[in-house]
Amino acid sequence: MFSIDSVVELFNQYNNIAVLISLLISIGIALSGVIPSVFVTGANILFFGPINGFLISLLGETIGGYITFKIYRLGFKKKAEFISDKHKLLDKLVNSDGKRSGMLIFEGILIPFIPAGFVTLAASLSNVGGVRFTIATFLGKIPSIALEALVSYDIINISENYIRLGITLISLLLLWFTIRRKK
């Protein structure tokens, strides 16, 4: 199993292709649909620094999302129509096109409690184009990766950032309880 330390060690071992390794790991995570990306973001922050680590993570997740979208579109279009029954937003996405589908993808990626893999699968079943999907995914991933980067950076530098980390974690818990309660 991967950990932040093992990924950083891999980056150190293959320093000259560390960005490529990070991107490939992110693509693999997107293809799996179930592995969280936070450990890659943490490794990117640790190895490349907060800004470059954020940008590499964002690029990796966007490329991974696009490749997964294309693969899902090839393999699941006929077989996975059931996905729309899982969530109202996903149902709307499957039956949308044009600008509306782009906004729904953006919303789905932005909502932290809908797995991005479900949004990608629903998008692949819709009539949305690859460019619109990629732009919506890129924009929707910015807040979640920024949050992952902030938390990773604060954990790595916990002695200086424990107060901000605590506030961030408490805020996330309150958000989770609020959203859960409204359901």
Image: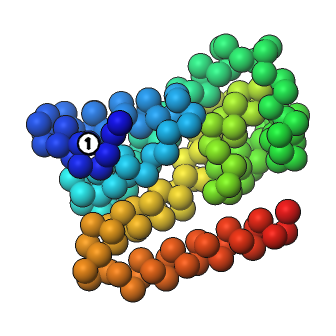
Residue 142 higher or lower than 88, as above or below: below
Q: Position of residue 67 (x, y in %)?
A: 53, 26
Find residue 181 and report its image quarter.
bottom right
The residue wearing badge 1 is 7
Residue located at (77% from left, 26% from top): 125
Q: Position of residue 118 (x, y in %)?
A: 69, 37
The residue positioned farthest toward the front in the image shown: 1
Residue 120 higher or lower than 162, as above or below: above
Q: Is residue 37 left or right of residue 153?
A: right
Q: Is residue 36 left or right of residue 102?
A: left
What crowding class fits label 1: few (fewer than 14 Cα within 10 Å), some (14-19), or many (20 or more)? many
Residue located at (61% from left, 28% from top): 69
Q: Position of residue 38 (x, y in %)?
A: 43, 52
Find residue 7 and report its image quarter.
top left
Q: Is residue 66 visible?
A: no
Q: Position of residue 58 (x, y in %)?
A: 44, 49
Q: Give amino acid for label 1.
A: Val
Residue located at (48% from left, 65% from top): 147
For the C terminus, give its image quadrant: bottom right
Residue 135 higher or lower than 68, as above or below: below
